[in-house]
Amino acid sequence: MLIKSQSAKTKSTRAKSPSTFESLNPATGEVVGVFPLTTKDEVNDAVARAKVAADRWANLSFRARNIVLRDWASILTRDMKEAAELIHRETGKPLSDATLEVALAIEHIGWAGKFAPKVLSRQSRPAGLLMFNMAAQVQRVPFGVVGVIGPWNYPIFTPVGSIAYALAAGNTVVFKPSEYTPAIGSFLEESFKRIAPFRDVLTVVTGDSTTGSALTESAVDKISFTGSTRTAKKVAAACAERMTPVVLECGGKDAVIIDKDADVKKAAEMTLWHAMSNAGQSCIGAERVYVHHQVADQFKSEIVARAKELTPGFGDGAKYGPATMPSQLKVIKAHIDDAASKGATFLLGGRDAIKGGYVEPVILADVPEDSLAVTDETFGPTLVINTVSDMDEAVDLANATSYGLGAAVWSKRNGKRIATLLKCGMVSINSAFSFAAIGAVPFGGVKDSGYGRIHGAEGLLEFTYPRTVVKRRFRIPLEFTTFERSARADRILIRLVRLMHKRRIR
Ligand code: NDP
């Protein structure tokens, strides 16, 4: 068994001095680093400096910014091993998962830089018959300084989904990493500094929730937040005070739907990874399965057989690590206990699944739909499998949640039809997690899972606002927007509108 004891790291006990805090390895308790608790004044200074840099950065051409981002991707590629080691130590996740995370982040940096000109270049729009003498254009303008507040579960991949797109769109960024992953946040800043054309394009402010809160109250021009729905509401409320626009990428309760014609073996293999990789600490992790009754027994026995082989731990061979944030263990325990007390069946694991800082795989069946394990985000290596009589029932149950982030559908013939019925931001068919790795598609959710998008063209647009510019190309005898407008102009206007819009209504 690879299980080691969990450190006593908690949010309240890690202050090293009034002005610093320690980041600990959640598996060993080793101190990964000591970091400043950035104060409100210091956050405001960082934002003020980023504002000065923002003008210069926005004035660079797309090509010039792309070269910087390309170089950053190249530096990170060269230092991939170092970055992965740091993620491994700071979050406890296996080195190979950490490497995958860095690789995907690099892919997004490359995509954002390369496609920014295509998505954000000014566009001409038809001015219409009434304004035919006007040239109409829409320009995309960067906000200025984007504050990025990141989580600890994917400490490079997730914030880079905002940072790279905000930078490519011409904003500078002040990034507040989670207090559980300040080392990897600082690593990102250091790597960017090596290729930055000037200072303050990407600044990292380490600290706790007070630092995050200071960022939301600062003079940033937009906030991109990833974390819990509870904190997202506080962030949105703080931003509302200053009318600061926000993107909120919150948690989920993602459902996996398995139809009777699914490749059940593949579905079991991938759903296990979907649910338990990164110790289940994924906003788009599978938390609920709705499986057709005709294949339910086969699916359950396949997934349980595979899950028995999973070993949590920190060393070589561990499939996933400890809970990065120890307080999450209480939530996981509460969900398991609640399901058990409501009559759920343990297909694997039990109430004693939590061992130190690790959670052994737990698979529950026939879990009442009002259980915490079905209604609330668990964020642990647990999975609920409920059997349904048909896909209509599966869709209804999948949608009966306050969340709406991602979902997966397994079916040879009905995947697309089922996907269109799901009330969420992203669906993968016959695969798991795959949308997160594709630079071209947006990432984000609806309902309690947040609003706004990162990644893809939508992610680039998110970090700009549209500026409409219309210009008179030539003079015409008919001027509508003047007090000098003639009766003849009025008659022509009415005739033109009738011509264009008057229809016989059936
Ligand atoms: P939080 O939502 O509290 O934290 C996310 C980020 O917000 C962190 O950087 C945090 O800083 C910062 N923050 C906290 N309070 C404020 C505030 N008032 N203003 C601005 N920023 C703030 O998540 P937790 O880390 O506490 O995790 C709690 C739960 O959230 C998890 O159990 C999981 O369910 C969910 N979660 C979802 C994630 C996702 O990917 N959608 C990622 C992480 C968590 P600091 O860490 O320094 O407090």
Image (cartoon, rainbow, N blue to C red):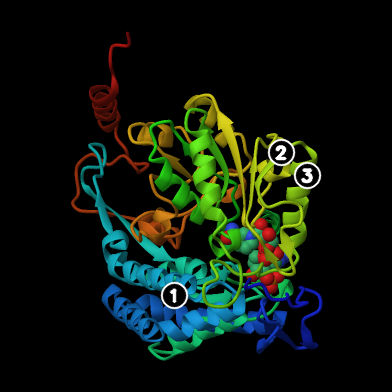
The quarter of the picture where residue 352 lies is bottom right
The x and y percentages for residue 60 are 33, 79
How many residues crowd around disc 1 within 10 Å: few (fewer than 14), some, or many (20 or more)? some
- Left or right of 188? Residue 415 is left
Of label 3 and label 1, which has the lower sequence position? 1
The answer to whether any part of residue 238 appears in the image is no
Q: In the image, which is nearer the foreground, mark 3 or mark 2?
A: 2
The quarter of the picture where residue 342 lies is top right
Most extreme residue toward the top is 506
Secondary structure at numbered mark 1: helix
**Depth check, front residue: 373 or 152:** 373
Of label 2 and label 1, which has the lower sequence position? 1
Q: In the image, which is nearer the foreground, mark 2 or mark 1?
A: 2
Name the amino acid, label 2. Ala
- Which residue has dot 3 on it? 338
How many residues crowd around disc 2 within 10 Å: few (fewer than 14), some, or many (20 or more)? many
Label disc, if present, on residue 344 of the rendered structure: 2
| Image quadrant, ligand 1 | bottom right
Secondary structure at numbered mark 2: loop
Name the amino acid, label 1. Thr
- Which residue has dot 1 on it? 99
The answer to whether any part of residue 80 appears in the image is yes
The x and y percentages for residue 38 are 69, 83
In which quadrant is the C terminus drawn?
top left
Label disc, if present, on residue 353 of the rendered structure: none
The residue at the point 28 percent across, 19 percent down is 502
In which quadrant is the N terminus drawn?
bottom right
> How far apart in space, not on screen, are marks 2 and 1 (Cα)?
37 Å
- Left or right of 500? Residue 90 is right
Q: Decide: marks 3, 2 in contact (CB < 8 A)? A: no
